[in-house]
Image: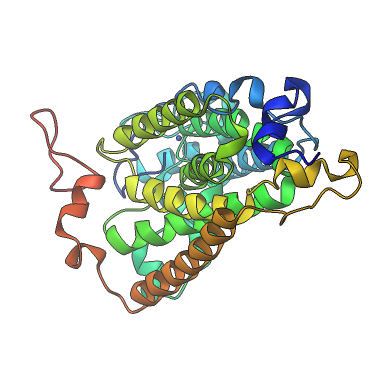
Amino acid sequence: MAVGDDDLENRMSAKDRGIGSRGGDRNRIGPPPMPVALASSTEFGDNALSSQWTSWLVPVFVAANVALFVVAMFVNNCPEHFESHRLRGHCVAKFLGRLSFEPLRSNPLFGPSSNTLEKLGALEWSKVVEKKEGWRLLTCIWLHAGVIHLAANMLSLIFIGIRLEQQFGFVRIGVIYLLSGIGGSILSSLFIRNSISVGASGALFGLLGSMLSELFTNWTIYSNKVAALLTLVFVILINLAIGILPHVDNFAHVGGFMTGFLLGFILLARPQFKWLARDHMPQGTPLRYKYKPYQYLLWLLSLALLVAGFVVALVMLFRGENGNDHCHWCRYLRCVPTSKWRCDDI
């Protein structure tokens, strides 16, 4: 007797089933989004599919970010700045010598100066558009404003990225990470012209977005669907809400999230259980397509939206258009004025 997809899913045992800030301005580098405990959002109970890959790419990404931060501090050389420019204040942690941090009044995150970050590839509209330095859309995601910024992003990357790489492999997760980072940089450049931006949070939000779309496109394999969805949505909303604080580049977060969300439908769809169990099915059992019809539909729609979005955004960017002219309320995505702070200079 042929076994239906739903029956097969219900009968499979648990052991066989399974499944971030950027910011900164020329004069002051602001705080990154506070780290949120993301471990609970990366595993969805007893439905998790067994891991198939060993995670190595995410640890390499973490090591690369840490190494580039050390390079940035070496290039920054705060003691030399202090002597040559007679800055007010003192370098922090002078015992580190050339690697000591900028005075806290100029960088409260314990890191290099904004001039150093700009020199090494920080995202800046004038250099990307007017000087045609498009490579900054990629290099900025490997730089961080300070130790606090770096630690928050790398802890989030470890929590999210390792689990995803174990589930889907290094190629797909690497593509999502890099394209999401670039997508966040593009949206940031469209809306922000008066400050520089650095950080991996756009790429991290892309991983979060891909987790959400992966849940949707693989909806039938989860038993605790609502709990998984609510947990993930809560984590995403909290992180996006933190992005409305001053000096946090929430446009990079939104752009990275949207890119990762679409890429999740394209790269993270799982085959039907009946397809996976075809070697153990009775001979003569009719096999259906590897993916369900709605997965193919989401794949095509997401690919079309992703390509169209990148093309339109890049054309607008290099034509020098200001995104704020087309979306007047979008400025509130980056900063919401309150009695505690103003957003006029953001």
Which residue is more in the foreground, 306 or 302?
302
Residue 2 is situated, as x and y percent measured from the top left of the image, at 78, 41
Residue 42 is situated, as x and y percent measured from the top left of the image, at 58, 28
Kindly tell me whether residue 120 is visible in this rendering: no
**Quarter occupied by residue 61:** top right
Is 201 above or below relative to 120? above
Residue 30 is situated, as x and y percent measured from the top left of the image, at 33, 37
**Quarter occupied by residue 308:** bottom left
**Which residue is rendered at x = 17% and y = 39% of the image?**
336
**Which residue is rendered at x = 51% and y = 53% of the image?**
180
Which residue is more in the foreground, 335 or 148?
335
Residue projecting furthest to the left:
339
Left or right side of 191 for 96: right
Which residue is more in the foreground, 345 or 334?
334
Kindly tell me whether residue 304 is visible in this rendering: yes
**Which residue is rendered at x = 79% and y = 43% of the image?**
276
**Which residue is rendered at x = 38% and y = 33% of the image?**
239
Is 183 above or below relative to 101? below
Left or right side of 6 for 184: left
Of the 4 image quadrants, the one containing the N terminus is top right
Colour mapping: rainbow
Which residue is more in the foreground, 103 or 297?
297
